Amino acid sequence: MITVEVDNKRALAALNRLIRAGANPSPVLKSIGEDLIASTKRRIAAGGPGPNGETWEPNSPVTMALAARFKRPKERGNHPLVDSGILKETIDHMVDGKTLYVGTDRFADEWNGGAAVFQFGTDRAGRGHKVTIPARPFLGISDSDARNIETTVKNFLSSLAGKNP
């Protein structure tokens, strides 16, 4: 199992306000999870940038040639992380108590290393393990995601105050 922990101060501060208010965080975390799924899928479909704002390195000429050889749809193979579309469609979330998990089950034993190769990069891909694939982090919280988390928590806390004057 691979874990990517996010330490976004803005998002954590908003979530800590929720916890201090004594509110059940599950509905808010579920909403945040759905928003993070959508933003992650948008990043993948657009070919980046990653949640850290860094532009992803374009696909190599070899990757592009393979995409053309196998007659994949035009948009596939042209953007990093988009080939079969499986990765994007497997992004999901789970809430467990006060913890929100957002990720994919495509991390192990798939695509010569799975989605972990895309998230972290590798210098041991392909035949003979001699191909380098650059890191293209797709999981994480962007500045825009952090602002949305703050807004979601603020709106939830406001609704609680309105119901319990």
Image (spheres, helix red, strand yellow):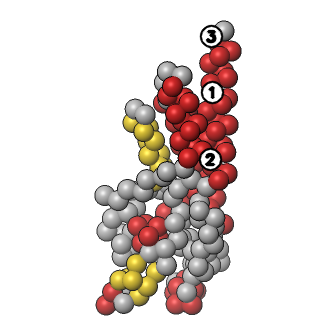
Residue 65, position in %: x, y?
55, 90
**Label located before the other in sequence (3 or 1):** 1
* Image quadrant assignment for residue 156: top right
Q: Secondary structure at mark 2?
A: helix
| Mark 3 → mark 1, Cα distance in angstroms | 12 Å
Q: Which residue type does callout 3 highlight?
A: Asn
In this picture, residue 61 sits left or right of residue 151: left
**Label located before the other in sequence (3 or 2):** 2
Mark 3 nearby-residue class (10 Å; few <14, some 14–19, many ≥20):
few
Give the vertical position of 113 relative to 153 (above or below): below
* Image quadrant assignment for residue 159: top right
Name of the residue lying farthest toward the top: 165
**Front one among 136 and 83:** 136
Mark 2 nearby-residue class (10 Å; few <14, some 14–19, many ≥20):
many
Asked if one can make out residue 27 in the rendered structure from this viewpoint, the answer is: no
Where the N terminus falls, by quadrant? Answer: bottom left
Residue 121, position in %: x, y?
44, 75
| Mark 3 → mark 2, Cα distance in angstroms | 27 Å
**Label located before the other in sequence (2 or 1):** 2
Q: Which residue is mark 3?
A: 164
**Front one among 61 and 122:** 122
Q: Which residue is mark 2?
A: 146
Give the vertical position of 81 relative to 91 (above or below): below
Q: Are marks 3 and 1 in contact (CB under 8 Å)?
A: no
Q: Secondary structure at mark 3?
A: loop
Asked if one can make out residue 145 in the rendered structure from this viewpoint, the answer is: yes
| Mark 2 → mark 1, Cα distance in angstroms | 15 Å
Q: Which residue is mark 1?
A: 156
Q: Which residue type does callout 1 highlight?
A: Phe
Q: Are marks 2 and 1 in contact (CB under 8 Å)?
A: no
Mark 1 nearby-residue class (10 Å; few <14, some 14–19, many ≥20):
some
Residue 22, position in %: x, y?
49, 21
